[in-house]
Image (spheres, coloured by chain):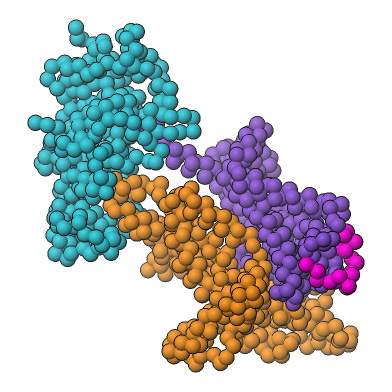
Amino acid sequence: MRILALVVRRLAWFVPTLLGLLAVTFVIARVIPADPVALIAGETATPAQVDALRRQLGFDRPLPVQFVDYVRRLVGGDLGTSLYTTRPIVDDLANRLPATIELTLVAMAASVIVGIPLGVVSALWRNSAVDHALRVITVSGLAIASFWLGIMLQLLFAMRLGWTPLNGRLAGFPPRGVTGLYLVDAVLTWDWATFGAALAHIALPAATLAFPALATLVRFTRAGVLEVMQSNFVLYERAMGLPRSVIVWKYILRSALTSTLTQIGLLFGILLAGAVVTEAVFDWPGIGTYAVNSIIRSDYNAVMGFTVWAGTIFLVVNLLVDIAHSVVDPRERVS
Amino acid sequence: MTSALYLLARLGRDRSALIGLALILVVIVAAVLAPVLASHPGDVFEIHPAKRLQPPGGEHLLGTDRMGSDIYSRLLFGARITIVIGIIAVGASVVIGVPVGLVAGYYHTWVSDLLMRVSDIFLAVPQVVLAIAIAQTLGPSLPNVILALSVTYWPWFARLVYAETRSLGKEVFIESTAALGASPFRVIALHVLPNVASPIIVRASIGMGFTILTAAALGFLGLGPPPPTPEWGRTIAESREFLPDAWWYALAPGLAIFLTVMGFNLLGDGLRDILDPRIRRAAAASAPDADA
Amino acid sequence: MPDLLSVTDLSVEFATDRGVARVLDRISLSVAAGEVVGLVGESGCGKTTLGRTILGILPGSARIRSGAVRFKGRDLLELDPVAVNDEVRGRAITFIPQDPWSSLSPLFTVGTQIMELMKWKSPRRDERWSRERWPALVRRYARDRRRADLDAVLDVLRAVQMPEPERALRRLPHEFSGGQRQRLMIAMALLPSPDLIIADEPTTALDVTIQAQILRLLRDLVKGRRVSVLFTTHDLATAYEICDRVVVMYAGQEMESAPTDAFFGGPAHPYTRKLLESLPSPDGDIRDIPGEVPSLIEPPPGCRFHPRCDYATAECGAGRPEARALGGEHRVRCYHPVGVA
């Protein structure tokens, strides 16, 4: 019951914020440019064509009316039509979504599985050689431009060493399957050859994407564990002789993770944002490449459609993280 | 002021913060003295197709690019662009965000809620996404990049200052000062602002790093200053088709970005360690107290 | 009969920014079986450090310079740390912390945490448990022992007057009041059937009205089970309430040790006398001790109280007095005990 009240409260935050996001994108799309219709019409259009288009799109109506219409269409799931493909943008995005999701999930899994234990170890062996080495890596992780890291990895592993393919998601036919996630589908259909190929293709992009996320996770986990180690309940557990591994991996980690959990949600945001640029580097057929290609092609509608879509996703993720955090930390539930 | 000197002295003892400061100074010197330090200052505009894609060595410290221009010289001028973008974007974010945060935090009206909701949007959505939209709309140019970055970064400062102002507002000394009839402006300027100065400084330093990375990403995507401007991100994009042979072409600008951002991050971390009262208290608490 | 716990000549130092703090200076103390000993002193006198040294949970910046902590005849400082953690801590010697508010993890139910304690420290624990090689995280909790342990837990919860023990186990720590939480901590200290409980100012953080209840409860329970207690406090009245014997500490040194009646009836050490005088009295005078607690980084030589003492002479600063027996169990470390020839 209390969780329900919590969800309702969070939704009360979510809806106006979403509207605000739409207002922001509306302003960017229609208010900022000198003539948004000219942008959509393209450079080759004559003034007469532009005017006709303006009336057709309803851009000559007052702004508030336009905004209501804008919101209505978006709620109805219409993100507009791509100027380049002339297909609805939602469809284009939906086609490319599985690729981005797969990449993001693999990167997230890698960073969590590697990052959290490293963070704990770093905190336990504070100021040791391991800790210092990890700090160098994590500081670097946040200072490296993702796209550059991707290019360097390509240079080394694909071009020079030939260990992985250069780009793309898969060279041959995708595995038959339902999820659209090649790795999952390959396992489900017992197609190990494709699994291996898909893994080789995803390795570099996932590593590139995961690196800053890993760095953040290690830092936050380390800080969280260090802070929790000062707690009175840790002192008590030590005084009562509980085994150290139990204290660390069961009790300390759980406390440290409640804040890390919020970080994982934000991590998802970082990863998704990084995906835009990383996909571009590796020609990964996902939403990020779509956005980049749209930029290159001056497909104005598509870029705005992508922005609205991405912004909404991030707000939703924020919402889910908030809720998850409250569920995990029982103190919030009761208060 | 003596406390400021004390803090600076403590910063001096933090080795990684000093390294960060050194890196930043190197980049700033490179930017300011670019015309002097460059071996081929004219190469920002001139092209020499005959000398294209030469490896590092001899006349060209870091080799030449696809137009035959000296990469080292262009890198130095690129530092100018980077520093300018960083300073103006972060500066504008501070100038906009701090007053917004102060006002929103001090007053408890619907205006505060509105301002914070707007900030929430920009905090929830990654900077790149919205910056791309803005830059695409306005067209690729240096001022537009700066504008896009400023518009998407000010909420971070607003939110930060808002939180601090709100928590300070609960402190008795604020209430009593206001009760004595001091004008809000006076209360804010004299009492609230000094207390929020530290987090602002820390966030500004770390913000420089993130802003520079986002700016480079925009440049890489073609949304930054157009050629022949030697922006680092764009240079990396240009280099791609010539890999793996002309590896220096991609390596140099990337390292430049890395070192610059690293510098700001290290400095920001160091500043946070000495300025963040919570960390100071935690450090004091973990030292054994005599009443143990 | 030999003492259950015997601390001899213990010196502990801490490394701080401003230098080395000599928190405990060749301190000696003993606790007999079934005895409740009060360790009384102002903040900073080192009583908490002493408790932590006995338990072996000092922070990394601490060094044990000298001395021995003999428990049941064996020096804990010399034994294998793994064995000490397994067999002594939480089993033979348990702990009641000062702060009931944060001494349990807020993320796990009380039941989970108590049963965790029982899993590792139950008196019904099999002999083979210590010798098993499996890593701690994967050890299984045998079901029949678990049931027996659970029954014991409920029994003890009833003994500490916890209302509705079964429901209590399903609750989170923050759902209890301060007094209730301290009862939980007392229950947890008793469950492993210890020989000695180190109670670190267990009532300081509680409301005054609750303090007396908790003290009486604790006393009844330990006396009924013949458990010794080393009870730390800065409040003399509390010591009077519950202790068989009182030891006074000042700046890392023990000053006087006496059975409660002798202590409150006729204290010999000047510091003790000042302490008793400084208790609020009906006529309303507030008499405090002039001067300040010394720095532990550069403490006064010899008897650390001598700079503030009315009776101090040159020898007080020259070297620390040895313990002097004053009849019965009354001991004092002073060159000029009051009321003695």
**For this view, does A158 lie left or right of residue A123?**
right
> Residue at 57% of width from left, 55% of height from top?
A136
Q: Colour of chain B?
A: purple
Which picture quadrant has residue A169? bottom right
The percent position of residue C290, horizontal first and vertical second, equals 39, 16
**Residue in front for this viewpoint, A158 or A64:** A158
Q: Is residue A195 magenta?
A: no
The percent position of residue C54, horizontal first and vertical second, equals 26, 37
**For this view, does B40 lie left or right of residue C101?**
right
| Residue extending farthest left | C1
The percent position of residue B44, horizontal first and vertical second, equals 87, 63
| Residue extending farthest front | B58
Query: From what the image shows, is residue C57 above or below residue B72?
Result: above
Which picture quadrant has residue C310? top left
The percent position of residue B148, horizontal first and vertical second, equals 74, 65
**Residue in front for this viewpoint, B211 or B144:** B211
> Residue at 44% of width from left, 41% of height from top?
B286
- Residue C206 seen anywhere in this rendered image of the structure: no
Q: Colour of chain A?
A: orange
Query: From what the image shows, is residue C328 above or below residue C135?
Result: above
Which quadrant of the rendered structure holds the C terminus of chain A? bottom left
Q: Which residues are magenta?
A: B40-55
**For this view, does C94 lie left or right of residue B186?**
left
Q: Is residue B48 magenta?
A: yes
Which quadrant of the rendered structure holds the N terminus of chain A? bottom left
**Residue in front for this viewpoint, C181 or C225:** C225
> Residue at 49% of width from left, 33% of height from top?
C17
Q: Colour of chain C?
A: cyan
> Residue at 49% of width from left, 41% of height from top?
B283
- Residue C124 seen anywhere in this rendered image of the structure: yes
